[in-house]
Image (cartoon, helix red, strand yellow):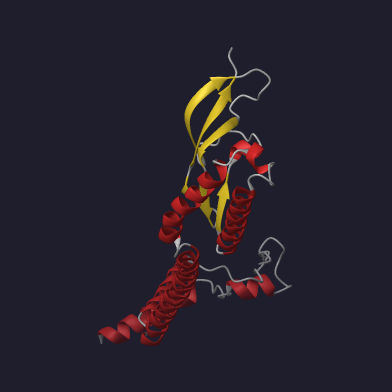
């Protein structure tokens, strides 16, 4: 009974109230029969041709890249390759160093062998210098005026010529083996502290300062190395 009464009341209310048809907003915008005041203008929408990543997309891309980097770093094949490359570089460096050391050893050995050959007779040459000095003293004891008297001093002249010839042959033989005698007083050379030893000095006008004028003991060199210095005197200029 109550439902029937409610249904009757609703029918009566609908009969008394005017009927308003329902119109959808989209249909009202598109329908040309509606008045202009009731129509809504549809605003145009523009869309970008490029995709602009959002913050979420950036974070996803960064996470993906980080994961790929982690995978590459943890790749055992890559680690093994890097270790092999480092080992190759280390072995190459050791090889180059070994080659350089071996070449230096070869050069040093050649120099040592050559020095041993050049100066193997250095002690023998030093002992021989005294004999050469004695022969030179024997020749210097004969005065030049005695040599001019060949008829009266024939024996002395022959002895001197024999000693002089012996000295010449001996010095040629010594020079062939690298031993040479030098005397700076013959040409008035300048004093050299590496080659000469001065025992006294004397002033002299008309001479170069530091020039050697007298030799007390002649020097010897073996293949360019001094084995005995020249003992001499030299001039100096008074100021």
Which residue is pictured at 42% across the width and 61% down the height?
124
Please indicate whether residue 94 sits to the left or right of residue 195 in the image. Answer: left
- Residue 146 on image: x %, y %: 63, 40
Considering only vertical position in the picture, is 216 above or below 220? above
165 left or right of 57 in image: right
Residue 235 vertical placement versus 145 (above, below): above
Q: Relative to residue 192, is residue 46 drawn left or right?
A: right
- Which residue occupies the extreme left position in the image? 1
Q: What residue do we see at 32% from left, 81% from top?
A: 6
| Rendered-image quadrant of the C terminus | top right
The answer to whether any part of residue 82 appears in the image is yes
Please state, as top left, top right, bottom left or bottom right, where the N terminus lies in the image: bottom left
- Left or right of 126: which side holds 211? right
Residue 208: image quadrant is: top right
Question: Considering only vertical position in the picture, is 132 above or below 189?
Answer: below
Viewer-proximal residue among 39 and 21: 39
Locate residue 89: give its quadrant: bottom left
Q: In the rendered view, tell whether residue 237 sits above or below residue 234.
A: above
Query: Residue 23 location in percent, x, y?
Result: 58, 74
Query: How many numbered marks have been drawn onto this rendered protein structure?
Result: 0
Where residue 201 sits: x, y (%)? 51, 24
Horizontal and vertical percent position of residue 225: 51, 53
Of residue 224 and residue 50, the one placed in the foreground of this image is 224
Tell me if I can see residue 68 in this picture: no
- Name the one closer to the observer, 214 or 71: 214
Q: Residue furthest front?
A: 152
Residue drawn at x 60%, y 18% is 237
Comparing 51 with 17, the one in front is: 51
Residue extending furthest toward the top: 239
Q: Residue at x 58, y 14 (%)?
A: 238
């Amino acid at each position: 009974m109550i439902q029937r009464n409610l249904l009757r009341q609703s029918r009566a209310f609908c009969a008394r109230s005017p009927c308003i048809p329902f119109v959808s907003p989209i249909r009202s915008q598109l329908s040309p029969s509606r008045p202009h005041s009731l129509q809504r203008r549809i605003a145009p929408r523009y869309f970008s041709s490029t995709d602009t990543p959002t913050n979420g997309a950036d974070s996803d891309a960064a996470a993906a890249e980080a994961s790929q980097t982690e995978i590459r770093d943890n790749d055992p094949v890559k680690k093994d390759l890097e270790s092999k490359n480092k080992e190759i570089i280390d072995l190459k460096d050791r090889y180059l160093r070994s080659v350089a050391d071996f070449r230096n050893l070869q050069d040093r050995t050649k120099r040592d062998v050559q020095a041993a050959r050049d100066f193997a007779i250095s002690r023998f040459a030093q002992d021989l210098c005294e004999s050469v000095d004695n022969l030179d003293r024997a020749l210097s004891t004969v005065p030049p005026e005695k040599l001019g008297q060949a008829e009266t001093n024939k024996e002395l002249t022959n002895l001197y010529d024999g000693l002089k010839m012996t000295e010449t042959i001996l010095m040629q033989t010594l020079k062939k083996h690298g031993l040479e005698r030098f005397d700076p007083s013959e040409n008035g050379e300048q004093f050299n502290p590496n080659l000469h030893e001065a025992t006294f000095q004397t002033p002299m006008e008309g001479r170069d300062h530091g020039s050697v004028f007298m030799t007390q003991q002649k020097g010897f060199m073996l293949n360019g190395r001094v084995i005995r210095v020249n003992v001499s005197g030299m001039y100096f200029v008074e100021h």
